[in-house]
Each structure stands twice: as C-alpha cells, then as structure tokens.
Image: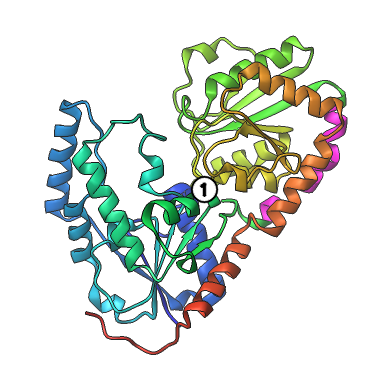
C-alpha cells in the first residue's frame, strides 16, 4: 500500500505545523516503509502569489486580516497537484491541508487531519470581526468541502470533533479523535526518568525552575506567567522562569532577575534542539497560561519529561492536561497570583512527583506518535484500503 501526503510543506522541516508534519511523516515511514510514502506536494504558482499579495494589502488597508482559506487559492492548489503522483498511491493523507484538498477531484480515499476548524478559530485566535465577512463565508465553504471530500477526518481534540459535528454536520462515523504526540525524538525522552527521581530533592531546597515555551507572548499568557513567578518569589521560593520561543523579549522582562530568556530554539538545528531538551530535563514545572490553544504539542512534550503542567482550561487542552493527573487547568479568569497559589498548594501536598509520573504515563499511553500511527492504521483498515489502483478523475 502506498500513501500520498498532500501538503505544501517540506516533510523534513521540523518547524512545519509545530513539527507535526515531520513526525507524522516519520511515523508513516516507520510503519509502512519510506518507499511507500510519497509527497504529493502542492505549491504556490505565480497567480496565487500575486493574488495573495494584493489580497493581504487590501485587508491591511481596511484593518482586516487575510486568510488562505480562500476559494481562488484553493482552486490554484488543486490545479498544482501532480496527477502522476496521485495515480501511484492508494490513499491520500492531508494534514492541515483543507486549502489543498477542497477542490481536489480524485477517486482515492482522503484522510484529513486537523486540530481545529475555522469556525472555532474565528473570534478565538483572532478578535471577532478580524476578517471580511465574505471571506469568513468562503473559509467555511472551503473547509466544508474539504471535510465532505474526506473519507475520514482525524481531529486532535474532542473540542474540534464537536465543532466538526455541530458546525459542519459531519457524520460521527467519518470522524476519529487522534491526539498528537510530543515533537521530540523517543531516545531523548528517556532522560526524563532522571529528572523525576531528582525532582523532590530540588523542590525541598526551595528552588523552582519553571519552563515557558511559546512564540506569541500575549496569547501564550506571558504576562500571567511573569506575575506567577514574581508571586512565587514573594512566597519564599527561589523561582526562575525559563522562556523559550520569544525572539524579542518584552521590556517588562528584561530587568527581571528571576527570568532567563533562551530565545527561539530551532529544532532543525541540532545544538538548539539539544538546548531545548536540556531545559525540559532541568526544569521542575511547565507553566503556560495560554489563552487560546487547539491542542498544544508542548503539553505532550512536558508530559514526556514528567513536568507537571499549569495552564488555562480552554480550547482542546483538556485532552492533553488532565486535572490531578499531569497538571491543572485553571479557569480562564485566573491571574498570575492564582497560578502561584495552585503551584504552592501542589508543592505543599507533595503532589509534584505524582503529577510527573502521571504525565509520563499519559505520554507513554497516548501522547506519542507510535500511538498516533496505531490509530492511523486502524483508520486505514476501517476504510478497507487495498493496493488496487483506482482511476483518477
């Protein structure tokens, strides 16, 4: 059986879609053989590039945002696909590729994968009214068409599953909840055992190293994280906030002695990747008061290294952070002081070690790419995909 991955992204890029493209590709290669995985790439042609430039310019002048969930762009992407590659495969896998498959006419099963729907994101990741109302309707149409063309849709959270059913009326037998794994190599995760064993001794000495990983300072709750660590220090802890992902640290952080900014760490660069792994090993807690999150790969990563997680209860986080198991989700109205109080309570109750072990088990059971591959394999068998070549329209 041959699988074609429909995406405009480079399959070897560890940054593409937070590394999800790379890790799903690697898992499919491991499971079915690299020779049986074909990159059915789409691309931006000159017309699309010119259209996107003008569209973005108009949107900016009107104080609006632009989205590639657009009929013209989707049609161009469908036209860019190499038909000779499609004839070589038995099934198409489309990760975050609703724009690419919305107008793709093929007689091959399509397995679509996403962590959200546009309906969920509009007004959540962006303020309500950020897009032209006509473009919102277009985006809905593009996504609906993609879901209808798919033989199965994989979603990374029950939050997204509910939207597919309620907002797009997708039959439940065409939907599967399949959580994402940690975007790390398996052999690097083994170092978590050493961290968990040393954790209690470190905290007993009053030292706390908290890890914050995110690119968007405001959306990821940087202000709240900063306030939390400030309060922890006032409580008597020797607490340090380690920030990863923020290229230009806000001025409010620069004078803080309890903040260490490690900048943006590129997983494609081995030395920077190693630095990130070392931070996961050295830190004691994972603090990310993110205000909008579809799933959160970083939560799978934190669990892999046994870091108890403290975050907001929003979006699809509930499938990755389970209260009392691998951390706590606080109400979205919670302040930095509330996070500090929750962390203090967990430490006083001696819960850190148990939460760390809970995260490790959650990672071992579900939040890993091998588990994702097993779920994908079940979908393949459910669709009864064979090696029989099917004519392409």
Choose between 331 and 88: the one closer to the eye.
331
- In the rendered image, the quadrant that contains the N terminus is bottom left
- In the rendered image, the quadrant that contains the C terminus is bottom left
Picture quarter containing residue 83?
bottom left
- Is residue 199 rendered magenta in the image? yes
Q: Main secondary structure of the magenta part?
A: helix
Choose between 286 and 165: the one closer to the eye.
165
- How crowded is the residue under tag 1: few (<14 C-alpha within 10 Å), some, or many (20+)? many
Q: Residue at x 51, y 12 (%)?
A: 252
Q: Residue at x 78, y 22 (%)?
A: 344
- x and y percentages locating residue 325 in the rendered image: 75, 43
Where disc 1 sits, the SS reads helix
- x and y percentages locating residue 309 in the rendered image: 68, 36
Which residues, given as a range, are shown in magenta?
187-203
- x and y percentages locating residue 63 in the rendered image: 21, 26
Q: In this picture, is 50 found above or below 256?
A: below
Q: Is residue 102 left or right of residue 164?
A: left
- Is residue 303 rendered magenta in the image? no
Q: Residue furthest bottom?
A: 388
Does the image show residue 191?
Answer: no
Q: Residue at x 21, y 36 (%)?
A: 132
Q: Is residue 173 left or right of residue 76?
A: right
**Which residue does the numbered mark 1 point to in the structure image?**
159
Q: Residue at x 60, y 69 (%)?
A: 374
């Amino acid at each position: 059986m041959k699988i074609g991955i429909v995406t405009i992204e480079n399959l070897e890029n560890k940054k593409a879609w937070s590394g999800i493209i790379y890790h799903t590709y690697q898992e499919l290669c491991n499971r079915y053989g690299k020779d049986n995985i074909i990159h059915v790439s789409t691309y931006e042609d000159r017309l699309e590039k010119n259209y996107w430039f003008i569209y973005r310019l108009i949107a900016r002048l009107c104080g609006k945002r632009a989205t590639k969930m657009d009929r013209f762009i989707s049609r161009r992407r469908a036209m860019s696909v190499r038909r000779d590659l499609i004839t070589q495969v038995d099934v198409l896998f489309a990760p975050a590729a609703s724009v690419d498959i919305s107008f793709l006419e093929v007689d091959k099963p399509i397995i679509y994968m996403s962590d959200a729907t546009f309906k969920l994101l509009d007004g959540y990741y962006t303020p309500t009214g950020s897009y032209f109302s006509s473009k919102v309707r277009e985006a809905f149409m593009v996504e609906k068409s993609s879901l209808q063309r798919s033989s199965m849709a994989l979603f990374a959270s029950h939050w997204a599953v509910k939207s597919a059913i309620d907002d797009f009326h997708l039959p439940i037998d065409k939907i599967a909840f399949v959580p994402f794994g940690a975007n790390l190599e398996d052999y690097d995760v083994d170092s978590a055992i050493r961290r968990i064993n040393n954790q209690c001794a470190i905290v007993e000495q009053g030292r706390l190293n908290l890890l914050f990983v995110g690119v968007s300072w405001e959306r990821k709750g940087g202000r709240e994280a900063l306030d939390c660590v400030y309060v922890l220090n006032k409580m008597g802890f020797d607490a340090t906030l380690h920030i990863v992902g923020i290229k230009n640290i806000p001025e409010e952080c620069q004078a803080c002695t309890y903040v260490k900014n490690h900048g943006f760490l590129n997983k494609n660069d081995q030395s920077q990747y190693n630095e990130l792994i070392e931070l996961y090993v050295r830190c004691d807690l994972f603090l990310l008061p993110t205000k909008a999150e579809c799933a959160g790969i970083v939560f799978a990563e934190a669990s892999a290294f046994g870091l108890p997680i403290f975050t907001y209860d929003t979006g699809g986080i509930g499938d990755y952070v389970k209260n009392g198991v691998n951390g706590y989700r606080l109400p979205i109205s919670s302040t930095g002081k509330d996070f500090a109080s929750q962390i203090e309570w967990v430490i006083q109750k001696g819960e850190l070690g148990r939460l760390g072990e809970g995260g490790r088990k959650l990672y071992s059971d579900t939040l890993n790419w091998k588990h994702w591959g097993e779920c994908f394999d079940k979908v393949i068998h459910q669709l009864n995909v064979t090696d029989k070549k099917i004519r392409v329209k």
